[in-house]
Image: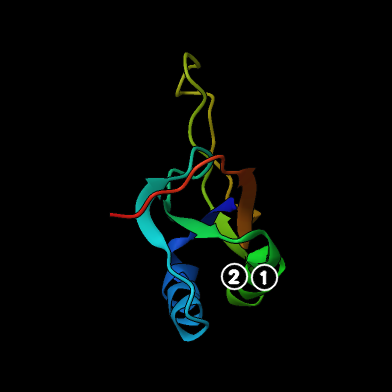
Amino acid sequence: MKLVIAVVQDKDSNKLAQNLVKEDIRATKLASTGGFLHAGNTTFLIGVEDHLVDRVMQIIQRSCKAREQVVAPMSPMGASMESYIPYPVNVQVGGATVFVLDIERFEQF
């Protein structure tokens, strides 16, 4: 058994949840916050048998797309605000960060 942990951007979370339900794959959704942009994410915990991992990965890949977003960088800590001029920059957001872990034991009550 495997535990698939997928961290996705909030914009992709509903689509991923719907696609998992269509494929009869159970998941637990957790609200999370990214460290880089301090933006909302959703973390999915998906427990599946080993032979279903590739299927889950395909669902995640087709549900979560990377996109570019313009953001204003945060001011550096400890720096003088007088000399800091934030210029908007394009960054890639979205997509998914996925971890697959071996599960030694699984119980459902």
Outermost residue to the left = 109
Q: Amino acid at mark 2?
A: Cys
The colouring scheme, among rainbow, by chain, secondary structure or one colour, is rainbow
- Left or right, residue 65 beside residue 41: right
Q: Which residue is mark 2?
A: 64
Q: Which mark, by number, is residue 87?
A: none
- Left or right, residue 77 beside residue 98: left
- Residue at image location 70% in from the left, 66% down from the top: 51
Q: CA distance from mark 1 to mark 2?
A: 6 Å
Residue 42: image x %, image y %?
A: 42, 56
Does 55 appear above or below 27? below
Does 16 appear above or below 83? below
Q: Amino acid at mark 1?
A: Gln
**Are the two marked residues, 1 and 2, in contact with CB atoms closer than 8 angstroms?**
yes
Does 99 appear above or below 70? above
Q: Quadrant of the C terminus?
A: bottom left
- Residue at image location 50% in from the left, 57% down from the top: 47
